[in-house]
Amino acid sequence: MDRLTAMRVFVQVLERGSQTAAAEALDMSRAMVSRYLGELERWAGVRLLHRSTRKLSLTGAGEQLLVQCREMLALAEGMQQLSRAADQAPRGTLRIACSQSFAQAWLVHALNDFTALYPQVSVDLLVGSEAVNLVEARIDLALRITNQLDPNLIARRLAVCRSVVCASPAYLARHGTPQHPEELTQHNCLSYAYFGRSLWEFSRAGEPCAVAVSGNLSANESMVLLEAALAGAGISLQPLYSVEALLRSGALVRLLADYQPQELGIHALYGSRRQMLPALRLLLDFLAERLASTAHWQG
């Protein structure tokens, strides 16, 4: 018979004052309670109870064993709580869609820290700039840098993405440095298919300004345009997170510093709050906290 159950029966009999009351509390027959008590006495090798028609009382050995039984039951309960906590730990695979530039510059490092905290969670990262159908592609979370959101999806704004206009020193040496957004019309501007392909928007002291740009190269991935800008092909509008280190090193030069390109929101998009996986809920909070802890990402 189960010794742990026998201990539980023994404790209940003493706490409730009778075998009948213990049987009711444990949802077992009185005969089964008596059997467990007998088995426990045989295992202990001593008599534990003085039985009479009026009351139950403990023997000396029974008093010692009662303390030990309560300690064992408390230990068993603690082990069960640890097991339940382990069962509730986040687990499974999360499919995440994200642009290459944001994934490479920031997200992959955050995911590395997240999976170190929750080793039973794995990530399948779908990299690309195109907006994908979350249901058809079985995407749990899409991270998009945009101000145009799908109204059918739930969006949580995580941070702000700032951009800068930049070019290589070699390009500027050949073609000159623009001092005003309108002068961009005289330059070869490398355009990104999903953001301001032909119209770059700025603001200065709260006043908006838009310039129609053109050039001999456009692409659907900003990392390609970044490489072209580094090679001296033209002027590029790039997210600050991609070029910050290059600006510090002098590989690229920031242009039109007095004019702020349009800011975009970094959004987490998902299909349902009610059916959200525990791992996804934790990841969302983790990413939001990580972005909020750095002024670089705040508006």
Image: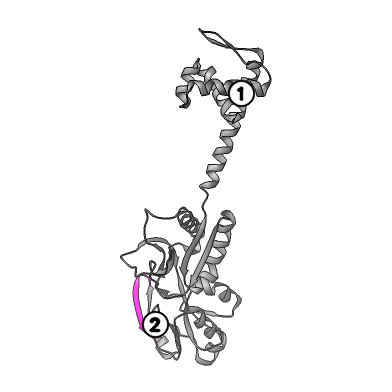
Residue occupying image coordinates x 41% and y 55%: 276
Q: Residue 13's spot in the image, x, y percent?
A: 53, 19
Q: Is residue 198 left or right of residue 94?
A: left
Query: What sort of colour scheme is used for the picture?
Result: one colour
Q: Residue 47's spot in the image, x, y percent?
A: 64, 15
In the rendered structure, find residue 197 and report the number of the disc placed on it.
2
For the stretch drawn in magenta, what is the main secondary structure? strand
Q: Residue 222's spot in the image, x, y percent?
A: 48, 79
* Amino acid type, mark 1: Glu
Determine whether the residue tagged by mark 1 lies in a helix, strand or loop: helix
The magenta span reads 204-213
Determine whether the residue tagged by mark 2 lies in a helix, strand or loop: loop
Tell me which numbered mark, 2 or 1, is placed earlier along the sequence: 1
Q: Nearer the viewer, residue 9 or 269?
A: 9
Q: Which residue is mark 1?
A: 39
- 216 above or below 125? below
Residue occupying image coordinates x 52% and y 54%: 91
